[in-house]
Each structure stands twice: as structure tokens, then as C-alpha cells.
Amino acid sequence: MRRPVVAGNWKMHGSRAANSALLSELEQGLNPEWPVDVAVFPPFVYLADAVRALEGSLIAVGAQSSSAEPPGALTGEIAAVMLKDIGCRYVIVGHSERRRLYHEDDVLVARKFAAALKAGLTPVLCLGETLDEREAQRTEAVVGRQLDAVTAMNGAETLGHALLAYEPVWAIGTGRNATPAQAQAVHAFVRARIAAQDAKIAGQLRILYGGSVKASNAAELFSMPDVDGGLVGGASLSAEEFTRICAAAAVRH
């Protein structure tokens, strides 16, 4: 069985004091015997602090985004190799907020995915549709297009070094979430699409659900056969809530 992953995307939240307290509580609350991989994704300015605080811990650190370009004259950008250099293991690629608010298109996301891999990071590739797209019954067309852009540029085999996250845009930060059946349907579609190119990679690939994951709905979501954990937003800012989500993922295993 695929080992579940629970990833906490802190987005633009936190302070040195709050982060220190949160990480300390998480380390105390997580059971090292749980068969689950755990990661946190603080804002850029707190990444080095988190890496230091979690040294020797079972909790990995990732970044919320990175540049598609190598180091150079690009003011305000962060290269993937820099994230690797300070101790990050993961980087989120193609989050819906980056796609929608900062106009990152499928080609740029595919290039960021490639840069992350080249730097030795594990990309967490996000896929998802808007409410209008779902209501127009275009979920599979949209998610398939986003996925195909990455595999066309990099090859399906590169997904063996990545995580995927299905995050319906209409369920992010809204309090709404896809039903377990809705999440399972999209996860199964994604896995089948990859299997058409590489069945072995598809079987091993861990696909997370992201979209208002909470302790109250985690167990039911994670019970679905193709849901391998969660990309957690707001609930990851509470050590108690996040720990309970990790516990639900461990039971699922």
C-alpha cells in the first residue's frame, strides 16, 4: 500500500514566535510510529528557521513555490537550487492561487516542475478545476490538460519523483470540500491517465487531496482507495487539528 502523506501549506501566515510554538507542538503530538510522511510549507522567509527547528525530526520542510529559472538576474525570485541548499525537500508547483492570481500557465508550471526535479526537490504538482468548470462538466478536461502539460514536457516517468495534489479550486479556503466520492473520481481519473503511459508509475504515485481538509472529514476522505493523504491549508496552522489529520492518514495505511 502507498504510504500516505500529509502536507501543511501555511500560505502567507506565521511569525517566528508562532511558527516556533506550532512546530514544537507538532513534534510533541506526532507519533513516530505512524506510517505517514509529514511536511510543512512555511513562507519563504521562515524556511531556514523551520529547517533548523526540525533538524533530526520526522517532519520535512518544503517551499510554496520556486522559479523555473536557474540563479541569475531575477529580482525577487527564488531558484529551486537555493531551496535545496537550505534543506528543503519539497516544493509546491502549480497551486491554484499561483495559477489564478499570478497567471502561471500550464507551460510555466511544467517548467517549474522540471527545475524542481533538476535541483533534487520533490515537486508537489497541484491540479484542479474552478466551480464554473465543474458545473460545466469540464473537470476531467481541465485536470487532464494540466497534467498532460507536465508529462509532455518532462515525461510520465518523472512523476515517479513527485507527488500530485488534486485541489478543486472551489473548495480551497471556502469551507466547502469535495465529497469523498467526488475526490475519488478525480484521483482515479488522474491515475488512469498516467497508467496509460506508465502503469508502474501510476500504481506507485501518491495523489493527495487538497481543499478544506479538516480533522472532521480527513478519515472519510483518506478512506478512498486513490486518496493518499492531504494537502492541508488552514487546518495546518493548528497543531491539534493537523496532528489529528495525520492520525487519520496513519489509520488509513
Image (cartoon, rainbow, N blue to C red):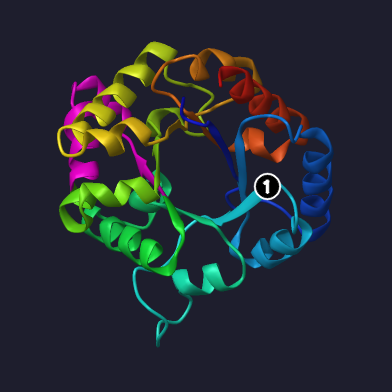
Reply yes or no: does residue 132 show up in magenta: yes
Please give the name of the residue rendered at 53% of the width and 31% of the height, measured from the top-left corner.
Answer: 4
Tell me which secondary structure the magenta stretch mostly adopts: helix
> Which of the 4 image quarters holds residue 198?
top left
Query: How many labels sit on residues?
Result: 1
Please give the name of the residue rendered at 38% of the width and 61% of the height, measured from the top-left corner.
Answer: 117
> How far from the left and from the top, in percent, is residue 195?
21, 32
> Which of the 4 image quarters holds residue 134?
top left
The local secondary structure at tag 1 comes to: strand
Please give the name of the residue rendered at 79% of the width and 45% of the height, measured from the top-left corner.
Answer: 22
* Of residues 226 and 144, the one drawn nearer to the viewer in this rendering: 226
Reply yes or no: does residue 82 show up in magenta: no
Residue span colored magenta = 124-148
- Residue type at mark 1 is Ile
Q: Is residue 43 above or below residue 244?
A: below
* Of residues 245 and 214, the one drawn nearer to the viewer in this rendering: 245
> How far from the left and from the top, in percent, is residue 116?
40, 63
Please give the name of the residue rendered at 80% of the width and 51% of the height, measured from the top-left corner.
Answer: 18
Q: Which residue is mark 1?
A: 59
Q: Is residue 49 above or below residue 234?
A: below
